[in-house]
């Protein structure tokens, strides 16, 4: 995540988040959710904010509507002495919506970071920025990724209002490439539809959570740390297959798209 402040314009750029899967769903005991993911440089979000006589937002209609909500939430939750006045928001590059790339979290945090600087704050953590725009209901990978980048593991939460803590982070080997294939005619679940899908899921068996944690701790992380691509790919494939099997009843199969 890069921030630059030429003159009176504050520009924030952030990459996308790949979510490899959760570690626990409706856990009977211990922490809930948790998960593994990776930040990638592209696709990215580039957002600029500057002071204006009245609030304006230049983006696609759907993105503009969400930015307006996040801007208003930010103003309600930030310190009164740092509340930004009227501003102009311009999005020159956007992460595809509802494609599993964390566009909501990354765009909202980019806006929050810009508004914080516009309000005179220079050091606001990603966790606090997320609180101000209401992110982190389930996964916090995008929140931690916005601040740290890399391969990330979050430890889950005990209370619904918590933001899941970051428990492991590794640099992803720079010469490993990630190929993203996104169907043009299908959107992932979001909002009320996503919340409804989670209510239909059965609790993830404790044995499956244990297996997923073993794959992450004993296979995926060591493979990435030692730059062992075949081992990392095998671990990620097994992790994804097991996760997809649990979510199959609400997404139509191990993979969310039949293609």
Image: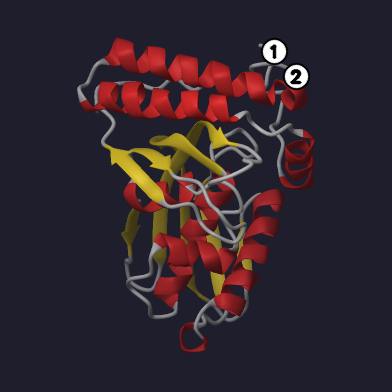
Q: Which picture quadrant has residue 8?
A: bottom left
Q: Residues within 10 Å of mark 1 (few under 14, many from 20)?
A: few
Mark 1 or 2 closer to N-term? 2
Quarter of the image where one finds residue 94: top right
- Measuring 44% from the left and 62% from the top, which residue is drawn there? 127
Residue 252 is labelled as 2
Name the residue: 71% across, 42% down: 190
Q: Are dots 1 and 2 in contact, CB under 8 Å?
A: yes
Quarter holding the C terminus is top right
When the figure is inspected, residue 210 is found, relative to residue 181, above or below; the finding is: below
Name the side, left or right, on which 86 lies relative to 35.
right
Q: Which residue is at the front of the view, 200 or 2? A: 200
The residue lying toward the viewer, choosing from 38 and 46, is 38
- The reply to whether residue 183 is visible in this rendering is no
Residue receiving disc 1: 258
| Mark 1, secondary structure of its residue | loop
Q: Secondary structure at mark 2?
A: loop
Q: On the image, which quarter does residue 67 sit in?
A: bottom right
Is residue 189 shown left or right of residue 86?
right
Residue 210 in the image: state x and y as whole percent.
49, 28
How far is mark 1 from mark 2, CA to CA?
8 Å
Tell me what residue is drawn at x 76 percent, y 36 percent: 197
Q: Is residue 38 above or below residue 94?
A: above
**Closer to the camera, 250 or 34?**
34
- Name the outermost residue toward the bottom: 81
Q: Is residue 166 left or right of residue 20?
A: left
Colour scheme shown:
secondary structure
Q: Position of residue 56 (x, y in %)?
A: 62, 68
Residue 82 lies left or right of residue 250; in this view the side is left
Residue 206 in sight in this render: yes
Image location of residue 98, percent across then percent down: 65, 37
User: Which residue shows up at 65% across the image and 23% down it?
Assistant: 246
């Amino acid at each position: 995540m890069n921030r630059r402040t030429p003159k009176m314009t504050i520009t924030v750029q952030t990459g996308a988040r790949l979510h490899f899967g959760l570690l626990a769903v409706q856990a009977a005991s211990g922490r809930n959710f948790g998960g593994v993911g990776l930040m990638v440089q592209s696709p990215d979000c580039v957002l600029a904010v500057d002071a204006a006589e009245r609030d304006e937002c230049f983006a696609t209609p759907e993105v503009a509507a969400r930015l307006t909500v996040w801007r208003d939430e930010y103003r309600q939750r930030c310190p009164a002495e740092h509340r930004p006045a009227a501003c102009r928001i311009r999005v020159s590059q956007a992460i595809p919506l509802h494609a599993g790339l964390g566009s909501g979290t990354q765009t909202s945090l980019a806006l929050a970071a810009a508004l914080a600087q516009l309000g005179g704050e220079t050091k606001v953590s990603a966790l606090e920025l997320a609180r101000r725009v209401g992110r982190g209901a389930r996964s916090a990978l995008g929140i931690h990724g916005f601040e740290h980048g890399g391969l990330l593991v979050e430890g889950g939460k005990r209370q619904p209002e918590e933001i899941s803590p970051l428990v492991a982070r590794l640099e992803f080997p720079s010469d490993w490439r990630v190929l993203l294939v996104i169907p043009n005619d299908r959107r992932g679940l979001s909002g009320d539809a996503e919340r409804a899908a989670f209510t239909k899921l059965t609790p993830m068996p404790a044995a499956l959570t244990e297996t997923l944690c073993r794959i992450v701790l004993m296979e995926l992380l060591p493979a990435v740390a030692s730059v062992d691509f075949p081992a990392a790919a095998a671990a990620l494939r097994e992790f994804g297959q097991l996760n997809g099997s649990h979510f199959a009843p609400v997404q139509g199969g191990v993979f969310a798209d039949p293609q």
